Image (cartoon, rainbow, N blue to C red):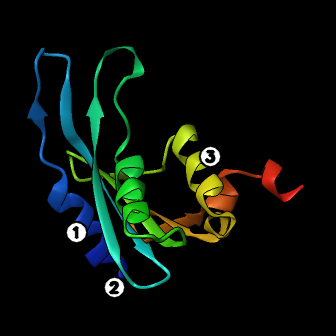
Amino acid sequence: MNDKELFDAAKSVCKPLALSAPEFSAGTVGAALLTAAGNVYTGICIDLACGLGFCAEASAAAEMLKHGETHIVRIVAVFENGESGTPCGRCREMLAQIDRRNLDCTVLLGNNKSTTLRELLPMHWLEE
């Protein structure tokens, strides 16, 4: 799977959905990750009050774990406007703790740019 296909997989699940109150929503961010085994898992964000929701990357990672995999090769998060962005700090840490090899996964940033999770988490405590 190439980068565009992974981006398109994330974008395809990014479908904003209003929830029980105007400030609550789901699907404004979609994520897709490619595992070392070649499988793609997707997820969406759920935005609720008091931090009760979760990010699209966490949702995709949960789907991956449900299938018994831990090693991510590439990951991308896409916002409802079609732009991609980096995982938040919480997601960066979660991905690293799931499998240390994920520190070397490629994070797609859009405009043919990418970085590694390791570059987003310099001097990570798991590597001490």
Dot 1: within a 10 Å radius of its alpha carbon, few (fewer than 14), some, or many (20 or more) residues?
A: some
Distance between mark 3 and mark 1 Cα atoms:
25 Å
Which residue shows up at 37% across the image and 36% down it? 54
Regarding residue 110, the answer to whether it shows in the image is: no
The residue tagged 3 is: 93
Distance between mark 1 and mark 2 Cα atoms:
11 Å
Three-letter code, disc 2: Met
Could you say which is closer to the camera, residue 38 or residue 112?
38
- Quadrant holding the C terminus: bottom right
On the image, the x and y values in percent for residue 124 come to 78, 51
Three-letter code, disc 3: Glu
Three-letter code, disc 1: Asp
On the image, the x and y values in percent for residue 115 come to 58, 64
The residue tagged 1 is: 8
The residue tagged 2 is: 1
Secondary structure of residue under mark 2? loop
Ranked by sequence position, the earlier of labels 1 and 2 is 2
* Quarter of the figure with residue 24: top left
Which residue shows up at 37% across the image and 23% down it? 52
- Residue 32 falls left or right of residue 23: right
Regarding residue 53, the answer to whether it shows in the image is: yes
